[in-house]
Image (cartoon, rainbow, N blue to C red):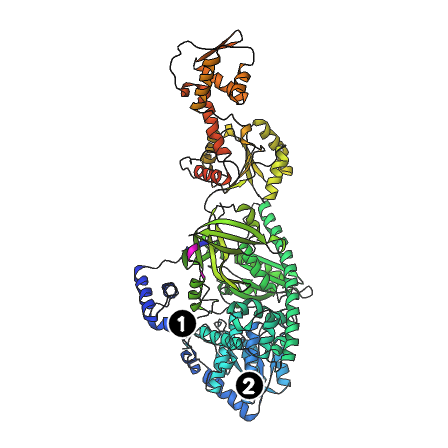
Amino acid sequence: MIRPNTRWEIADLGMDDRVRAEELAAKLKLPPIVARLLVQRGYADLESARKFLFGGVERLHDPFLLKGMKEAAARIRDAAERGERVRIYGDYDADGVSSTALMIRLFGRLGLRFDYYIPHRTLEGYGLNEAAIAKAAEAGVTLIVTVDTGISAVEQIAYARSLGIDVIVTDHHEPPQRLPEALALINPKQDDCPYPFKGLAGVGVAFKLAEALLGEPPVEWTDIVALGTIADLMPLQGENRILVRLGLQRLQEGGEPGLAALADVAGIDLASIQATNIAFGMAPRINAAGRLEHADEAVRLLTAADSESAAAAAFTLDNLNRERQRVVDEIVREALAMWADRCSRAEAEDRPEPSVIVLAGVGWNAGVVGIVASKLIERFYKPTLVLGIDAETGMCKGSARSVEGFDLHAALTRCAELLDHFGGHQAAAGMSLHRSRLGELEESLFRLADEWLTADDRVPKTRIDLACGVEEATLDVLTELQRLEPFGAGNPAPKLLLRGGTVADRRTMGKEGKHLKLSISGGGRLLDAVGFGCGELAPRLTEGAHIELVGELAVNEWNGRRRAQFMVSDMCVPHVQLIDCRLEALTEPVPALAKLADRYAVASCTALVPSPAWKEVLEAAGPSKLPHLSAVYTYDDIGHLSEGQICPELILLGTPPSAAKLAEALRAFRDIGAVYALYGTTARSGRAVDVPDREQFGRLYTTLRRVSPLTGEDAAGRLATMLGWQAERVRFMLNVFAELEFVSLANGTLMLADAPEKKDLSRSALYREAGHRRESDLILFAETKAFAEWIRSQSEGAPQSTIQEGADIS
């Protein structure tokens, strides 16, 4: 048994929604699977579905519906006419850099006198700051236009006004209760802003400003809009979906020099670029500049006019990204050790494990702590704050990531008196505070998490769109699903539940075997499946195991061949599995159990042994030699166990005394995930004599009638020679005859009884016992698949399976 890592929630359409899906399929000529997904995702009426699937530039909203747009456009036109000096003030992440690059293109086209400024992440931090504003005033700047920042800069904008600088804010972050008194605030999330779509990225808001000033949507800049929107994890719905789709088309046509060079260093083929390529290949390299050095290099890339300068900037960003990866790995190692120590102390003090992870380290790079927080979330699924501490000032700058059910922005708002600065949204946030207040912040967040999070909230959730069989996971289905692209935040790639499959083959791949490659059989076909980071599961997956997989359908292209491939995100084997080591050598129980547990990474196991002597040896070894061992029982102990004792991993060390005894043990334990069988015997023949059939008993009796009486000590041997049988078999048969009073042995003479009473062989206790032993051996030494099915039936409380005679260990 392998349990899933997440809670699976399978979407289920009600009758009304099924009817709507059928109507969409008919009216829009869609495959049923696509129509069903549209309804599940909220596009149940014809108009919304048509807009989602086919919406283009004509579906974009009027930019002047944005509050403040009219005032902003008028002020920028005035600046252009008067030749004022204008400064673009951006942010250092990919959205901020994209927004800055788009504004540079816009102001260049408008003929403005302008420059741009992006603060240094480590030295200045996020957003507007007074020192930068003062420098702008010294340079003669009279208008600052912010992109992807500014909505919370109350004091800073007031300071700019005092220096005679007007400020136009374009932003998309959550507005605070008190807004700055800027000349214009453009943010669709303002309470009184009538703009229909609230999910624009910072670069999306900048695009709308460009549209307002140019009188038409600058479609040629949608490649930059796609980059910033995808990088900032904005929902690919509404206008974002239109802009990103247009941007991907621009990139597929070749793109600007900077983006083409960036795709080249990332190993991305622009002709087939998708949103995921931007998210995982291009965006991290743009972000690397601002995380480790300064975002200027990323701006230079996105505004490069020729291929040579673009290639140089892309090369620099690629190297920075490699360094970023190294720094992240180092901080993650330190953070994991710090968290393990904190949990150990909590356990020693009999306190619960903290419900929020708050970790801070001196010298940790504030530019990458958000990535570290995301990695910790993936591992522990708890709201996580990671902060870097300045050793000289004691100031902490950090980032936070959250889980469903815990609103980070709301939580930090409740802790605002402890923070110097914070901003963000439900799932991610940034903050700064002095290290002396870290303890108070932790305690406040712990209380909020315990108050807000339910037991279900503490387990990650996987929302599944569709369930299907192996035979349905085809290239044709994948082609139909691709109608819903681009995929990303708010419009994820359809998550499928693959049912009815069995493991046909499994192996590890990649460096150190970290990844899993499966061949799944079902519906008369085979399907390849890949689980990245799942390599440790390979030894625990047995051939023939029934398996359920959650993931996405993808294309595997190799040597010109295209095949469907399933990308696994979670899996479940809903039954006990057999790890068959029966024929391996077993000399001493302690080293044998230790070796087995280490090989299969068994964390905690129960051992079943055939004798009290072995039990004593294992218990005497103790945790120092057998840290994996939680309990040891003999088969005679089973009847004394408490009902339903939990046993995730069961090791059969030594040959069980009988199938009946093993069945009793399997039924005594609950939630058995795997059974590891190590008998230490090489053949079934060593366990019990094969029971001769009635015809063989008849042949022996006929022979006895011909040669009886027989004198001498080895009558069985002489009969065996006559019949060509083994002496042990004949000796057993003679004992059965003697028990039934068919023969007698007196004074060294074997002779038939005179006129014996007719009796069935089954009346012999020896014959019955041998039959039971033979039946038991047919189970205990059956081939792997049959033995696994029998174990499964017993652990599930089902009637005993029938094993075909003649089956042997594979």
Determine whether, in the image, residue 511 is placed left or right of residue 207.
right
- In reply to whether residue 309 is colored magenta, the answer given is no
User: What element does badge 1 sit on?
Assistant: helix
Segment tinted magenta in the rendering: 470-474
Residue labelled with disc 1: 53
Disc 2 marks a residue whose amino acid type is Phe
Disc 1 marks a residue whose amino acid type is Leu
Q: At which x and y percent is residue 162?
A: 57, 83
User: Could you tell me which residue is drawn at 41 percent across and 56 percent down?
Assistant: 468
Q: Earlier in the sequence, mark 2 or mark 1?
A: 1
User: What element does badge 2 sit on?
Assistant: helix
Camera-side residue of 21 and 98? 21
In the image, residue 207 above or below residue 319? below
User: Could you tell me which residue is drawn at 51 percent across and 81 percent down?
Assistant: 220
Q: Residues within 10 Å of mark 2 (few under 14, many from 20)?
A: some
Residue labelled with disc 2: 107
Q: Residues within 10 Å of mark 1 (few under 14, many from 20)?
A: some
